[in-house]
Image: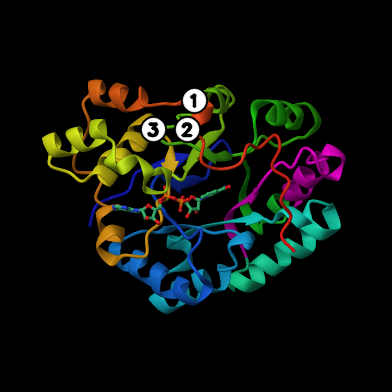
Amino acid sequence: MTAIPTIELNDGNAIPQLGFGVFQIPPEETERAVRLALEAGYRHIDTAEMYGNERGVGEAIRASGLDRADLYVTSKLNNGFHRPDDARRAFDDTLAALGFDYVDLFLIHWPLPTLYDGDYVSTWKTLEDFRSDGRARSIGVSNFQPEHLERLAAECDVTPAVNQIEAHPYFVNDEVRDYDRAHGIATQAWSPLAQGEVLDDPVITGIAERVGRTPAQVVLRWHIERGDIVFPKSTTPARIRENFELFDFRLEPDDVERIAALDKGEDGRIGPHPETFAYVPA
Ligand code: NAD
C-alpha cells in the first residue's frame, strides 16, 4: 500500500498529508463511506460537528478493527458554541459522538468576526485548555484570515497548528497560505477539487492526458506539491480509491505553475468569505 507522507506540525505532532473529508455526506451514509476510505488506505478523517456525521466516523473506525493510535481524526467547533462554556460542552459532545477520549486535531470552524463581539480569542483560549488536558492532541483554526491570526498571536499563548482554508486552482489563496507558512502554521486546503468544478478545465485535462492520470489526481497532486494537507470527499468507491493514488507520480514544475495560473482571485471563491460569514445553525 502507498505510504502517505506526514507533515510535522509546530507542536511536534505529525499529520498525514492526505485524508478523507466527510462534508455533505449524510449521517446514514457516513459509516459506509468512511469504511470504504479506510479499506482504500486512508488513515486521516476530517469531520465537524456542523456536518452532523461524527457518530458515523467513530463507528466506521471502531468497526475497522484498526488501532485508534493509527488513525488521525479532526473535528471542529460549530458556530453556535464560541462562548467558552458552550465550547466546553460542544467539545464533550464531539468526543461522545465520535466515541473517543481524544481527537488528534480540533479546530474553530469559522472566526465569525461579526458575532460574539468579535471575540474568537476567548474561544481559542478554551481550545488551549483542551490541548493542555490532552483531549485534543493538536488545536488549530479554520477560515482564519491573517488579521485574525495576528490577533491570536498578540493575545494568546499557543500558535494554531493548522489553518484550514478554501484553496484550489481557481482560488489559490496564497495570501493566507504565505502568512501561514511564515508563522509555522500548516495549511489545509478545503474543497481541494473546488467540489468538482476544476476537473473539466482544459489545462487540467490536458496535463492529465499527458501524464496518464485523472484530472482529480492531477489537482490533488498539485496541492501535495505545494505542501498543503488535503482531504477530498467522495462517496463513490472507485473515486475514493482514485483520490488516494497520488504518491507514485510527480508533476513538472512547469505544470505546477500552469495550474496555479488558473487562479481567478476572489471570483474563484466558492465558499463564503470569512470576514462576513455569520451562519449559526439552528
Ligand atoms: P471537494 O473539493 O473534495 O470535492 C468533492 C466533490 O468532487 C465530490 O462530491 C464529487 O462530486 C467530486 N469528486 C471527488 N472525487 C472525484 C473524482 N476522483 N473524480 C471526479 N469527481 C470527483 O469538496 P469538499 O467536500 O467541499 O471539500 C473536501 C473536504 O474539505 C470536506 O469534505 C470537508 O472535510 C472539508 N471542508 C471544510 C470546510 C471548512 O469550512 N473548514 C468547508 C468545506 C469543506
Question: Marks 2 and 3: which is nearer the front?
Answer: 2
Q: Which residue is mark 3?
A: 169
Question: Marks 3 and 1: which is nearer the front?
Answer: 1
Q: Position of residue 109 (x, y in %)?
A: 65, 49
Three-letter residue code for mark 3: Pro
How far apart are labels 2 and 3 at the CA level?
A: 8 Å
Three-letter residue code for mark 1: Gly
Name the image quarter holding the N terminus.
bottom left
Q: Is residue 232 left or right of residue 205?
A: right
CA neighbours of label 1 inside 10 A, class few (<14), some (14 to 19), many (20+): few
Q: Which residue is mark 2?
A: 268
Question: Is residue 214 shown in magenta?
Answer: no
Q: Position of residue 162 (x, y in %)?
A: 57, 39
* Colouring scheme, one of rainbow, by chain, secondary structure, one colour: rainbow
Labels 2 and 3: the sequence-earlier one: 3
Q: Position of residue 200 (x, y in %)?
A: 28, 41
Name the image quarter holding the C terminus.
bottom right
| Whether label 1 touches label 2, CB < 8 Å | yes
CA neighbours of label 2 inside 10 A, class few (<14), some (14 to 19), many (20+): some
What span is in magenta?
102-129
CA neighbours of label 3 inside 10 A, class few (<14), some (14 to 19), many (20+): many
SS label for mark 1: helix
Residue depicted at 58% across the width and 23% down the height: 179
Residue depicted at 24% across the width and 20% down the height: 254
How far apart are labels 3 and 1 at the CA level?
A: 10 Å
Q: Which residue is mark 1?
A: 265
Count of picture labels: 3
Residue depicted at 54% across the width and 23% down the height: 175
